[in-house]
Amino acid sequence: MRRFFHGCERCVGRNVVKALKVLGKALVALLVVLVLLAAVIVGLRAYNRHTYPFASVGSSSVVGEGDGGASLSVAPIHGDQIEGFHITPERKVHPGVVVVYGGSEGGADRSRAEWLVSEGYEVLSMYFFGQEGQRQGLAEVPLEQFDEVSTLIDATVDGDGPVTVVGTSKGAEFVELLAAKGFRVDNVVAFVPASYSYSGLVFQQAEELPSFTYKGEAVPFASFRAGSMAAGAKQMWDMVTGYPVSYRATYESAAEAAPDEARIDLAHFGGNVLLFGGEDDQLWQSADAARELEAQGERVEAHVYPDAGHVFFAHAEELPDGWQIMLGGTPEGNRAAYEDSRAVLLERLDQWHGRQ
């Protein structure tokens, strides 16, 4: 019996040694694969950074912040929840005020604001996040900050007249929600709009956050996490390898899985809505959103440009390569959208605000 157990011990020992050898070989193979994968990623990042430099610069590089001018008067705005610039023309031609917001880049769209001022409008060029007293990231941004803007308008804007709000991309989502929730807005202009509210763009915590809040509660949103895993995996791989990231599939899959309450409802808004979408928008589906919102009411007007992307550039040929994948459109299509949208916007603003 003792000889039997001794033989079993030797057998078990040999099996353990074999198992350890197999495990060791597997770990070595895994290490080799990880080293090769890391080498591939490093190589791809170097190649993509060289081939697509726009991916490193980002879309904020095409958003101008303005530089003032001899015919403009610019006063900084510092409030409890609002930051921006009050810009007035040398001679105000149109009554009322235009309130301009940027997008997810965190700007105040000074270039558009100063262009409108040059056309005789009084303009508030505003940040909706990222400044002192505001949410630092684009998540849980309170819509109620616009109440402070309304108070500022009452106190400082010259004369009476309509209030038109203009937003681009996430700023478009923001101004659409202002109208949907009944804030003091007469007209809405949304460049590359959204027909849903989406997840916030702060990802440091386990909980997924909304982009906006209203009365202390999350505005219902289309969740990135509820969307397609394939779209998320593709986006992650592009980010890791430095390839220009198109987020459109992520937003489309989030919208497909979204609850109805995440839709932006403008059906009961009593003012005018003007929308500009790019059919080839590669950041999100702005053309589809423009058409969906237009179907909500007779006073909602959509203009969709077939060869335009997420940003209507005047001179796309001056940008480094990569913007075509990230933002979409052709140089000619984006230029046409830029020129036509400006002409349509001025025409509608003149109709809404009139002249004094």
Image (cartoon, rainbow, N blue to C red):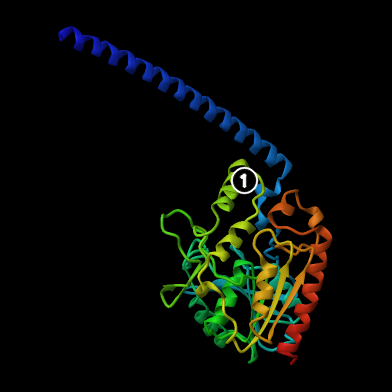
Image spot of residue 41 (x, y percent)? 60, 35
Q: Is residue 72 left or right of residue 253?
A: right
- Is the residue 53 above or below the residue 340 in the image? above
Name the one closer to the observer, 261 or 214.
261
Q: Is residue 48 left or right of residue 37?
A: right
Give the quarter of the image for residue 241.
top right
- Is the residue 241 above or below the residue 14 in the image? below
Q: Please, what is the three-letter code of the amino acid marked with disc 1? A: Asp
Q: What residue lies at 15% left-to-right and 9% top-to-bottom?
A: 2
Image spot of residue 280 (x, y percent)? 74, 61
Q: Which type of secondary structure does the marked residue at label 1 adopt? A: helix
Q: Is residue 161 left or right of residue 216?
A: right
Quarter holding the N terminus? top left
Image spot of residue 222 (x, y percent)? 52, 66
Q: Is residue 79 left or right of residue 56?
A: left
Q: Residues within 10 Å of mark 1 (few under 14, many from 20)?
A: some
Give the quarter of the image for residue 307.
bottom right
Name the one closer to the observer, 356 or 17.
17
Q: Which residue is mark 1?
A: 238
Image spot of residue 250 (x, y percent)? 59, 57
Q: What residue lies at 58% left-to-right and 42% top-to-bottom?
A: 240
Quarter holding the C terminus? bottom right
